Amino acid sequence: MVGAHLGHNTQIADHVILANNVLLAGYVEIHDRVFVGGGSVVHQFTRMGALSLLQGISGVGKEIPPFSIAIGKNCVAALNVIGLRREGFNQAFRNEVNSAFELLYGSRLNWSQGLEEAGKGVWAPETMIFWDFVAASKRGICPMARWKEIKRKETHLH
């Protein structure tokens, strides 16, 4: 859309939507079917995984795993359940992706421990996109949003 900036060596895959005034620094990788909300900024050498979504007026310098919704500054808020459903993924696949997401974000494991635990299980090839992305991260992945902190910041803004 209007006013989007793509820095040098940026890679944009298929069916990506960049809303108004999105800024992508150099060497950013945007995978298939990603939506980047208006006014968002993505730091150089950062990746956004397939079917991820970045809420408008957000900024990330850490990577957003596939199938995730990111908000604010370097925070993942949820699994992109609606996006998965719209893309026609069946309930069994959505359940497995949810299990992967919960293992990474819902447990008290750090992401390398989550990867180790995931390696003990058997995952569908489509779900392995999630784990392979996390394993290949060089910048680190966005942590889960801490809602109490976000609410506290919103309260102080008013």
Image (cartoon, rainbow, N blue to C red):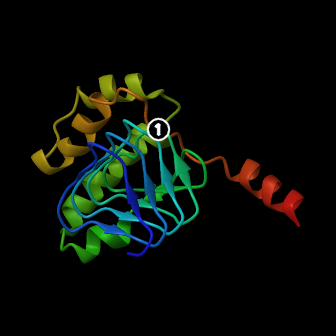
Question: In the picture shown, does residue 28 fall above or below 52?
Answer: above
The percent coordinates of residue 75 (x first, y second) are 55, 47
On the rendered image, what quadrant is the N terminus found in? bottom left
Q: Observer-nearest residue: 105 or 6?
A: 6
Q: Front-most of 32 and 103?
A: 32
Residue in view at x 21 percent, y 33 percent: 121
Number of marks: 1
* Residue 73 screen position, x and y as percent: 60, 48
Q: Position of residue 111 (x, y in %)?
A: 42, 29
Q: What element carries label 1?
A: loop
Specify whether 59 is left or right of 3: right
**Amino acid on which the number 1 mark rests in the picture:** Lys
Residue extending farthest left: 125
Residue 32 position, x and y percent, is 21, 58
Q: Which residue corresponds to the image point at 33% horizontal and 30% vertical from the top-left?
A: 137
Residue plotted at (85% across, 61% down): 157
Quarter of the image that includes the C terminus: bottom right
**Horizontal placement of 60 versus 79: left or right?**
right
Instruction: Please state which of residues 2 and 126 is positioned toward the viewer in this rendering.
Output: 2
Q: Is residue 79 above or below residue 142?
A: below
Callout 1: few (<14), some (14-19), or many (20+) C-alpha neighbours within 10 Å? many
Location of mark 1 (residue): 62
- Looking at the image, which is closer to me, 50 or 89? 50
At horizontal 32% and vertical 28% (from top left) the residue drawn is 115
- Relative placement, left or right, of 121 versus 62 is left
